[in-house]
Image (tube, helix red, strand yellow):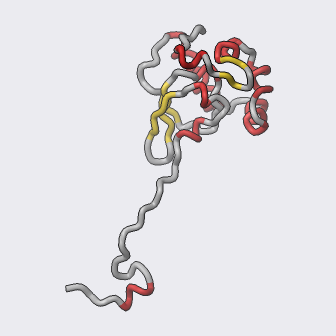
Amino acid sequence: MSVEIPAEWKKFRYRGKSLEELLNMPMDDFIKLLPARQRRSLRKGFTPSERTLIEKIRKIRRDSKADKPIKTHVRSLVILPEMVGLKFAVYNGKQFVEFQVVPEMIGHYLGEFSIPIQKVEHGEPGLKATRSSLFMAMKG
């Protein structure tokens, strides 16, 4: 499972380890480098949906078919070093948000990059929008 690492990613370090070292590291050693929340979720094991996604990722890596983004509803999966360079489309409850995994995302969750909440921009209040609008003069 060799991955071509672009030149700008070779400078990347995660807790003192290069991307190449992270890719060759056993999962148990990698888990020790993660923050507590991610470490705990990986130690508990993968859910069936997470396991299916990881198998899909490994199959794509083996066949080197990384053209289209990998669509998924799994937001709770921790980004692993083997996911670097792949494109994902994570469902945010309304649509799939596409992004490419870069080394700086290692240790974060997939859901962190597919924000489900949109900023609300309110317009002007209309009739019966609030109690005070009851006393507004009717237009026209």
Task: Please identify the quadrant where the N terminus is shown.
Answer: top right
Q: Where is residue 39 in the image (x, y as percent from the top left)?
A: 77, 32
Q: Would you place residue 124 above or below residue 52 in this image?
A: below
Q: Residue 75 falls in which quadrant of the image?
A: top right
Q: Would you place residue 105 above or below residue 28 in this image?
A: below
Q: Position of 31 compared to 4: left or right?
A: right
Q: Would you place residue 43 above or below residue 128 in this image?
A: above
Is 73 or 112 nearer to us in this picture? 112
Kindly identify the residue that appears in the image at 49 percent across and 28 percent down. 100
Farthest-out residue, left: 140
Q: Position of residue 18 (x, y in %)?
A: 68, 17
Q: How many marks?
A: 0
Kindly identify the residue that appears in the image at 24 percent across and 85 percent down. 139
Is 17 or 59 nearer to us in this picture? 17
Q: Position of 127 compared to 118: left or right?
A: left
Q: Position of 37 compared to 92: left or right?
A: right
Is 85 or 95 nearer to us in this picture? 85
Q: Residue 42 falls in which quadrant of the image?
A: top right
Is 54 or 36 nearer to us in this picture? 36
Task: Please identify the quadrant where the C terminus is shown.
Answer: bottom left
Kindly identify the residue that appears in the image at 63 percent across and 36 percent down. 109
Q: Residue 112 falls in which quadrant of the image?
A: top right
Q: Where is residue 26 in the image (x, y as percent from the top left)?
A: 75, 15
Q: Where is residue 46 in the image (x, y as percent from the top left)?
A: 70, 30
